[in-house]
Amino acid sequence: FVQLRAPLFGALNGPPSTAYQLILEGVQRLARRGLDNEALAYRHALALLRRRGMLAPVNPMPSLAASSTELSS
């Protein structure tokens, strides 16, 4: 999932098997605490990958709004 959405989450740095293991451990930790919300699991997994340096920074999306110089001309 993360590999297919690199523009959204950042490119995966490292082997997918390592990322999978980190995600699995994180989801298991959440489950032990009784937290089984899917959105929470995604946020937790992405945070784990970022902390371990496994996700490259995401380039900010270009602004859709016109810049002030374009508006004044």
Image: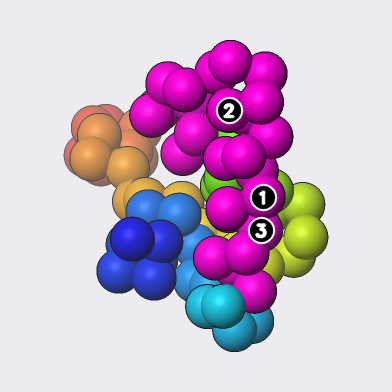
Q: Give the quarter of the figure containing the N terminus.
A: bottom left
At numbered mark 3, what does the secondary structure look like: helix, strand or loop?
helix
Question: Residue drawn at (37%, 54%), measured in percent from left and top?
Answer: 8
Q: Position of residue 32 (x, y in %)?
A: 66, 26
- When asked about the image quadrant of residue 52, the answer is bottom right
The residue beneath circle 2 is 31
The answer to whether marks 3 and 1 mark residues whose Cβ atoms lie closer than 8 Å is: yes
The residue beneath circle 1 is 25
Crowdedness of circle 3 by 10 Å Cα count: few (<14), some, many (20+)? some
In this rendering, which labeled residue sits more in front, label 3 or label 2? 2
- Judge by depth and name the residue closer to the eye, 56 or 69: 56
Crowdedness of circle 2 by 10 Å Cα count: few (<14), some, many (20+)? few
Vertical arrangement, residue 5 with respect to residue 68, above or below: below
Q: Give the quarter of the figure containing the C terminus.
A: top left
At numbered mark 1, what does the secondary structure look like: helix, strand or loop?
helix
Q: Would residue 59 be visible to someone looking at this image?
A: no
Say the numbered circle drawn on residue 22. Answer: 3
Q: Position of residue 22 (x, y in %)?
A: 66, 58
At label 3, which amino acid type do we have?
A: Leu
Q: Is residue 44 left or right of residue 37?
A: right
Question: Residue drawn at (30%, 69%), measured in percent from left and top?
Answer: 4
Vertical arrangement, residue 49 with respect to residue 12, above or below: above
At label 2, which amino acid type do we have?
A: Ala
Q: Is residue 29 located in the magenta-colored stretch of the structure?
A: yes
Q: Is residue 21 left or right of residue 2?
A: right
Question: Residue drawn at (50%, 34%), measured in percent from left and top?
Answer: 41
Seen as rendered, the residue at the extreme right is: 52
Q: Earlier in the sequence, mark 1 or mark 2?
A: 1
- Judge by depth and name the residue closer to the eye, 17 or 47: 17
Q: Earlier in the sequence, mark 3 or mark 2?
A: 3
Question: Residue drawn at (58%, 28%), measured in percent from left and top?
Answer: 31
